[in-house]
Image (cartoon, grey):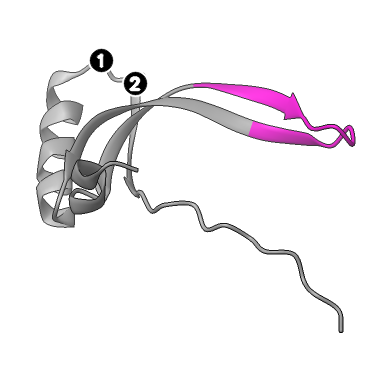
Amino acid sequence: MTYFQQLHPWCIIRVLSNEQVSDNAGVNYGVQQSNVIARFRHRDDAVAYLQVLQHHSIKNINFLIIFDIKECEIFPIMKL
């Protein structure tokens, strides 16, 4: 995650499509493909920009506001 992304955690994303992805064990997960449209430091700024996008865009385009955080690394449990 870049320094800019750390400073601007609120994102507006455009949801493109749904796909089924399976892992090595054969378990299916629903994954949504998306594009980050813009990043903001404050949620209120993201909400205001989302309202502008929805007003000026085609009605069947879906946008979401998310709080983008760095993925946490999961450490294996150590048994003593």
Task: Answer left or right for 36 relative to 34.
Answer: left
User: How dense is the environment of label 2, judged by Cα within 10 Å: few (below 14), some, or many (20 and up)?
Assistant: few
How far is disc 1 from disc 2 in space, using C-alphas?
6 Å
In this view, 71 is above or below 31: below
What's the residue at 12%, 38% (across, down)?
49
- Give the residue type at disc 2: Ile
In the rendered structure, find residue 61 and report the number of the disc placed on it: 2
Q: Please report contact status of discs 1 and 2: CB closer than 8 Å, yes or no.
A: yes
What's the residue at 35%, 43% (across, down)?
1
Return the residue nearer the eye: 27 or 17. Answer: 27
In this view, 5 is above or below 16: below
- Give the residue type at disc 1: Ile
In this view, 63 is above or below 59: below
Which residue of the protein is positioned furthest toward the front in this rendering? 80
Bounds of the magenta segment: 17-30
Instruction: Residue 40: name its quadrant.
Output: top left
What's the residue at 10%, 44% (across, down)?
48
Return the residue nearer the eye: 68 or 78. Answer: 78
Tell me where residue 69 appears, x and y as whole percent. 38, 53
Task: Answer left or right for 48 relative to 8.
Answer: left
In the rendered structure, find residue 58 and report the number of the disc placed on it: 1
